[in-house]
Image: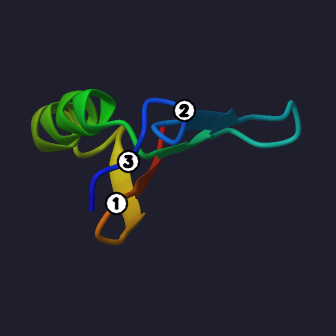
């Protein structure tokens, strides 16, 4: 599925009450960078969900 530039969003969710942040993205470049981080640092970065156009990671 082809997304417009406007639809290729990334949302970072973090609050002071938790130790982790959640990153939701529909941007292919960000997804590639996160895939590399998940592979290189599996104890820090974790893929928690994905579908055909998005991924969600916990940092």
- Indicate the quadrant where residue 34 lies: top left
User: Label 2 belongs to which residue?
Assistant: 6
Mark 3 / mark 1, whichever is N-terminal: 3
Nearer the camera: disc 3 or disc 1: 3
Q: Which class describes the residues within 10 Å of circle 3: few (<14), some (14-19), or many (20+)? A: few
Q: Which of 25 and 34 is in front in this view?
A: 25
Residue sitting at x 17%, y 35%: 32
Q: What element carries label 3?
A: loop
Residue 23 locus on image (x, y percent): 54, 41
Residue sitting at x 24%, y 28%: 29
Residue sitting at x 74%, y 34%: 14
| Alpha carbon distance from label 3 to label 1 | 8 Å
- Indicate the quadrant where residue 44 lies: top left
Q: What element carries label 1?
A: loop
Mark 1 / mark 2, whichever is N-terminal: 2
User: Label 3 belongs to which residue?
Assistant: 3
User: Label 1 belongs to which residue?
Assistant: 53
Label 1–label 2 contact, CB within 8 A: no
Q: Is mark 2 on a helix, strand or loop?
A: loop
The N terminus appears in which quarter of the rendering?
A: bottom left
Q: Which class describes the residues within 10 Å of circle 2: few (<14), some (14-19), or many (20+)? A: few
Label 3–label 2 contact, CB within 8 A: no
Task: Answer with left or right where residue 32 lies relative to residue 3.
Answer: left
Label 3–label 1 contact, CB within 8 A: yes
Q: State the mark number for residue 28.
A: none
| Alpha carbon distance from label 3 to label 2 | 8 Å
């Amino acid at each position: 599925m082809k997304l417009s530039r406007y639809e290729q969003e990334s949302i970072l969710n973090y609050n002071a009450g938790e130790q982790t942040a959640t990153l939701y993205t529909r941007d292919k470049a960000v997804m590639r960078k996160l895939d590399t981080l998940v592979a290189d640092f599996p104890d820090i970065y974790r893929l928690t969900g994905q579908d055909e156009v998005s991924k969600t990671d916990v940092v």
